Image (tube, rainbow, N blue to C red):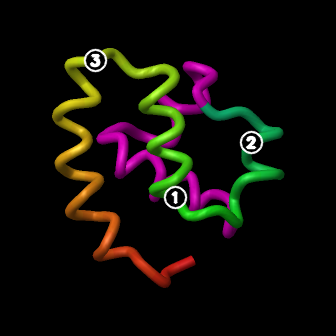
Amino acid sequence: RLQWLWLERVAHLLQSTPEHLLQSGLIDDVDLLEQWRTEPRHAAALIRSCWMPDHYQASAATSTASLGTAGAGKQ
C-alpha cells in the first residue's frame, strides 16, 4: 500500500500515471521494493534526468519545483 502511494506521487510529479511508469519500465518491482522510502521528488528527478525527453524535462521541472515544497515532510 505505501509503495503504491509512493508510486502515485512519483507519477504525479512526472505528469504521468503509475501504470505508465510500470508498463514503460521507468519503474520496476525492484524500484518499488528499494526506493519507496525515498522522497518522491528525488525519484522523479532521477527518472526525468535519465529517461525523459528534453522538452518534457523543461515543462515538468516547473511542476516539480512547485510540488516539491508542497509535499515536504509527507511520506
Spatial separation of the CA atoms under disc 1 and disc 3: 20 Å
Q: Amino acid at mark 3?
A: Asp
Q: Which residues are magenta?
A: 1-26
User: What amino acid type should be assigned to the residue bearing mark 2?
Assistant: Asp
Quarter where residue 14 is shown: top left
Percent from the top left, x then y, of residue 32?
Answer: 73, 48
Q: Earlier in the sequence, mark 2 or mark 1?
A: 2
Going from N to C along the chain, the mark reached first, 1 or 3, is: 1
Q: Quadrant of the C terminus?
A: bottom right
Disc 2: CA contacts within 10 A as few (<14), some (14-19) or many (>=20)? some
Q: Is residue 8 left or right of residue 33?
A: left
Secondary structure at numbered mark 1 = helix
- Tell me the residue that label 3 is attached to: 54
- Is 69 situated left or right of 40 in this image? left
Q: Which residue is mark 2?
A: 31
Depth check: 29 or 70 in front? 70
